[in-house]
Structures are given as structure tokens and as C-alpha cells.
Image (cartoon, rainbow, N blue to C red):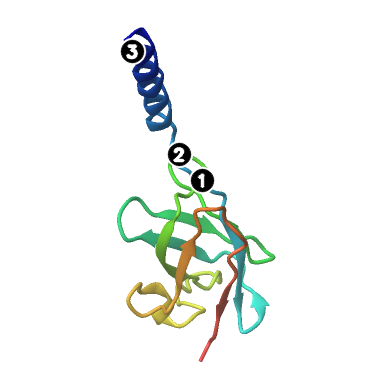
Amino acid sequence: MNGRIRYLSALLISLLAVSCQAPAEYTVRGVVRLDGQPLANACVNYLPVSGKPAIATSDDAGRYLLQTPQGPRVPPGTYSVVVTANSHRRLDTSSVIPDRYGRPDESGLRITVPSQGAEAYDLELISR
């Protein structure tokens, strides 16, 4: 009987330890290109099926690193991706990429962050 209580106690402690672990999250980065060229200052949004979105702004080389309010970590799952980029000329707010990339149902960009870890997720956009 004493052995059975120790076994059940050990099992309960193991289950509690496993259930207290934080869910896996990953660093997600990539490069945004328009017609094969790096796209600077693009706003990249990963929109999950459920949960909070992750966002990034690309640098001069088109590189982005997704951020959430908790930092640069993204949970695994499937995301619709939208990208917007406006002209940086004074008083010109026109988009430098087709409007479809700014709409999740039309962008054609879907990313799955695998549970075994993130990779580089490059986004290839076409201007026509």
C-alpha cells in the first residue's frame, strides 16, 4: 500500500510539472522581396486562426523579425500573412505593392510555423 501511494504521488507530481510548462514559441524571421528585390519598410502582419497577431517592419535589406506584445516569439500554427508598404515620398501615401497583399483573404500568403521550430520565412511578392 505504501508503495502504491508513493507511485501515485510521483505520477501526480510529474503531471503537474508537465502541465505547468509554457507553450512552445519560436523566433520567426525572413525577407520580404518585391519582384526579387528586397522591400524596405514593409509592414508584415501574421494573423493566426485564433490568438494574437504578430507584426514586423522590414529593414533596408527587406529583413523582418516578428514581434508580439510579449517579445520576438510566435506560437506554432497557421497564419494568414498581409504585407503593406507605402511610398515614402513626402505627401505620397500610395502603396508600392498591389493592394491584394494587404487583405488576408486575397494575399495568397499563408505560413505554418512548425512545432519543431521556426525557419526563415521569405515572402516573395509580385508587382503585377
Q: Where does label 3 land, which residue?
A: 5
Relative image position of residue 21 (x, y in whole percent): 44, 32
Residue 70 — which label? 2
Q: CA distance from mark 1 to mark 3?
A: 41 Å
Mark 1: amino acid: Arg
- Dot 3 crowding, Cα within 10 Å, few <14, some 14–19, many 20+: few
* Direction from residue 39 to residue 113 in the image, left or right: left
Mark 2: amino acid: Gln
Q: Quadrant of the N terminus?
A: top left
Helix, strand or loop at label 1? It is loop
Relative image position of residue 79 (x, y in whole percent): 41, 63
Q: Nearer the viewer, mark 2 or mark 1?
A: 1
Q: Is residue 91 above or below residue 22?
A: below
Q: CA distance from mark 2 to mark 1?
A: 7 Å
- Furthest toward the top, the residue is 2
Residue 73 — which label? 1
Residue under the point 41% across and 63% down? 78
Q: Is residue 121 above or below residue 4?
A: below
Helix, strand or loop at label 2? It is loop
